[in-house]
Amino acid sequence: MSRSRSPSAHDVVRAHLAEQVGALRGWEDRARANQPDAVHQMRVTTRRLSAALSTFAPLWKGAALTHLRSELAWLGALLGEARDVEVMQARLHTLAAGDAEAQAGLARLDQHLEARHREALAEIDATLASDRYHACLDSLESLLARDAWSAAADRPAGSALASLVRRDWKRVRRRVRRAEHSRGITRDHELHAVRRAARRLRYAAEAVAPVYGPEAEATGRAAKLVQDVLGEHQDSVVSAELVRTLAAADRSEGHAAAYARLLAAEARRRAETDVLFEQAWTALRDKRSRAWMRPSRAR
């Protein structure tokens, strides 16, 4: 979108939303056929839509967004089950590579995960054919109609959108502060919340990049780095929980050492992500990466 057009907030956000709705529809058949990366991309699109409705909520009229965000959360969680199983299976095999003792426990883990994956894919297939899913699509389409937008959407994008993205930045900062004062399992939960907040900031920055250009793109990249590092942390937490659950149910003495080695490997991964997170957060909180969000810098 050309900056010379002086687009309104409606122009920018509607274009972003329309792109994501089109992408969601575009991934349907491929996700149902379990084509490579299709479920993951459909999940990402769902999250982008949900993030847009949260960040830019003041641009729409009424309270319908609450229900729609709930429906997108439902869809994202359903798509996430299949994707998470794929990630966990690949992750555990990577951890066990070159470790014969750790590999001894993979057969049972694979059996468990493959059963979950089949169930998740069947649920996706049924859901994408359901009335509930199509009602969600209809609700998204209705948000594109001009009469769904508030008066705030008519403001110039350059002055209207930066403050909305800045709220997302502040949410990340609050979450980080909470994580800094927590320990153990609570800290894991707080870091997961930081990750979600960073993801929302990333998507918001990317959505307004047609207006703010390289500055917003840089914020998006910095937020993505935080998201990625904490994604690794969360995958490690989930993986360790899975291993502990199966270890408790597996009475085979021969597998005990394998489970212990997998858990030790995950503990090392989490220690590594602590260092990487500090580096990523330092980059994101740099004032230069968010100067464009200041009201005095609005375009």
Image (cartoon, helix red, strand yellow):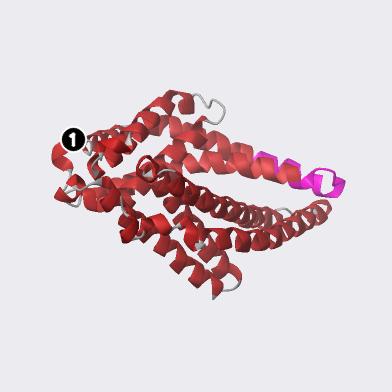
Q: Main secondary structure of the magenta part?
A: helix
Of the pair 290 and 71, the residue shown nearer to us: 290
- Image quadrant holding the N terminus, namely top left
Q: Nearer the viewer, residue 105 or 159?
A: 159
- For the residue pair 87 and 130, the one nearer the viewer reads as 87
Number of labelled discs? 1
Where residue 110 appears, x then y in whole percent?
69, 40
Q: Amino acid at mark 1?
A: Ala
The percent coordinates of residue 244 (x first, y second) are 67, 58
Q: Residues within 10 Å of mark 1 (few under 14, many from 20)?
A: few
* Quarter of the rendering containing residue 98: top right
Across and down, in percent, residue 165 comes to 36, 54
Q: Is residue 145 magenta?
A: no
- Residue 69 in the figure: left or right of residue 245: left
Residue drawn at the location 61% of the way across and 42% of the way down: 87
**Outermost front residue:** 4
Q: Residue at x 55, y 31 (%)?
A: 37
The image quadrant of residue 128 is top left
Residue 97 within the magenta-colored segment of the rendering? yes
Residue occupying the point 32% across, 38% down: 3
Which residues are drawn in magenta?
95-111
**Residue at x 44%, y 42% (from the top left corner):** 78
- Residue beneath disc 1: 145
